[in-house]
Image (tube, helix red, strand yellow):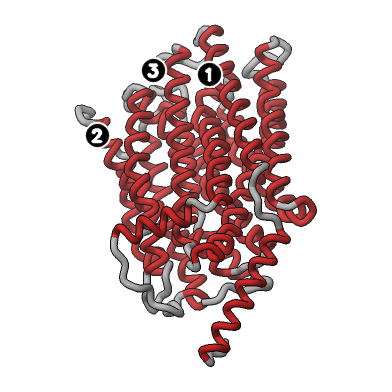
Amino acid sequence: MIPAAGKLPTRLKIFHGLGSVAYGVKDNGFSTFLLIFYSQVVGLDAKLVSLALMVALLADAFVDPIIGHMSDRTYTRWGRRHPWLYLAPLPLAASWMLLWSPPADHTYIFLYLVVVAILVRTLVSCCEVPSFSLVAELTTDYDERTALVRLRYLFGWAGGLTVFFLANAVFLRKDATHEFGQLNPDGYWLYGLTGAVIMAASVLISAIGQHSRMAHLPAAKPAPSSPINALREVKESLRHPAALILLGASLIAISSMQMTFTISNFLYLYVWQFSEYAFALLPWLLMAGVVVSFVLVQPLHRRFGKRLTAIICGIISLVLWITPFALRLARVWPEEGTTQSTSLLLCFMLLANINAVMVMVSAQSMLADVVEASQMKTGRRTEGVFAAGWMFVQKCGTAVGIGATGLLVSLAGLESRAVPGQVATAVIDRLTIAYCVLVILAAIASTLIFARFPITRADHEARVAALDAAAKIDRDAEGVHP
């Protein structure tokens, strides 16, 4: 099917965006609860939790490109992507339940975490890679791709923050045995069950909503291919200079963001000493930031382009997020745990998150524009390969963020089952200083790399026009008319 050049129906955009809810649920779980659940509740050392997720990442290094390539070469009457979107959600839901329901016998808990984390990551890829691939398939329009991506982020964050809210406000409540709800093991099973249902339903409904538009026999049947040829094609696509620049910058930015998500519960509990009310308010604040970024990002792309928007928003986000930590270390911040401290911090978080989300929307929209640049060079449309590259970068970022957080928590000297409000100031200062240094270095590196991204609106539109002209010549030569 030839991607549309104009505006897409709003209903189609909404169904497409809905498919990202599953990734949002998964990302929230891995980023905010997994480390604290397995280290502080289950009792596995934080370094081993990080190691388990790094091992799972190594498996992803082989799985994601294979899924992307196979998705590009799928040839059925339901199109290239829909068979994946119908088959993967239910196994994903089951594996998600297993992640939050570890066996009572913890003898092999490290191995259990490794195996289940690999299973979850693989099945998430089977849903997200085909779903994200549809961005470049649905439209070639520079701005419509941003419209699709921002909806994916809106729904992805909505899914993740919904379960985050339910976890903090409903499932993870303090009781007579557990003074802090985040350390109450009983709520994590319900958290897993709710996330599993949301994951499966969102992917299936999204696929059904796009079925009539995209579920058709592809125009050309892929030629037979060998594993060696498949690896060659994947390598050729991902080695495109624009792809390397974008994925490299995004890897650094996502690693920093994921480290922030992963360490957030530690910071909220042990540094800022949030109350239950603050934890319940947090997801709504984050969602408000995503909504504002949804409104702002497309006008900013029209005015400044995707690359400059990503650079400017990245710098603003860093400054806003680091400021409260700097003020606290300078001893001019209100006393932690007070209403004044919490309210002020939430304001900084809101503004920082608005800009951070716009960085990610810009990057993912830019990646869709690399599809045509690669097609000009290779003669192939490999949306699935680029989607797999993005997924791999996201998973690398998640693993690096979790790994870095595990090391920071361990090196800072924060003990397992530490009680908030009773941790030495020196431990808290070591944790926050090391964290801030890493975030600053990551922001500088990603900004410098983003600045080298070569594709502008004019480049993209000229390339699309050239490809359309070449396709028309081929159709005329063959006597085929659209």
Element type at mark 2: helix
Residue reaching furthest to the bottom: 479
Number of marks drawn: 3
List x then y, in percent, for residue 203.
45, 60
Q: Which residue is mark 3?
A: 416
Q: Name the residue type under label 1.
A: Tyr
Disc 2 versus disc 3: nearer the observer: 2
What is the distance, in whole Å, between disc 3 and disc 1 at their CAs? 12 Å
Q: Are marks 3 and 1 in contact (CB under 8 Å)?
A: no
At 56% from the left edge and 28% from the top edge, which residue is drawn? 276
Between residue 248 and residue 269, name the one nearer to us: 248
Dot placed on the residue nearer the N-terminal end, 2 or 1: 2
User: Where, by quadrant of the figure, is residue 367 drawn?
Assistant: bottom right
Q: Residues within 10 Å of mark 2 (few under 14, many from 20)?
A: few
Element type at mark 1: helix
Tell me, yes or no, if residue 277 can be seen here: no
Q: Name the residue type under label 3.
A: Ser
Q: Name the residue type under label 2.
A: Leu
Between residue 50 and residue 453, name the one nearer to us: 453
What is the distance, in whole Å, between disc 2 and disc 1 at their CAs? 29 Å
Q: Residues within 10 Å of mark 3 (few under 14, many from 20)?
A: some
Element type at mark 3: loop
- Residue 111 is marked as 2
At 71% from the left edge and 47% from the top edge, which residue is drawn? 292
- Residue 270 is marked as 1
Residue 357 drawn above or below residue 463: above
Dot placed on the residue nearer the N-terminal end, 3 or 1: 1
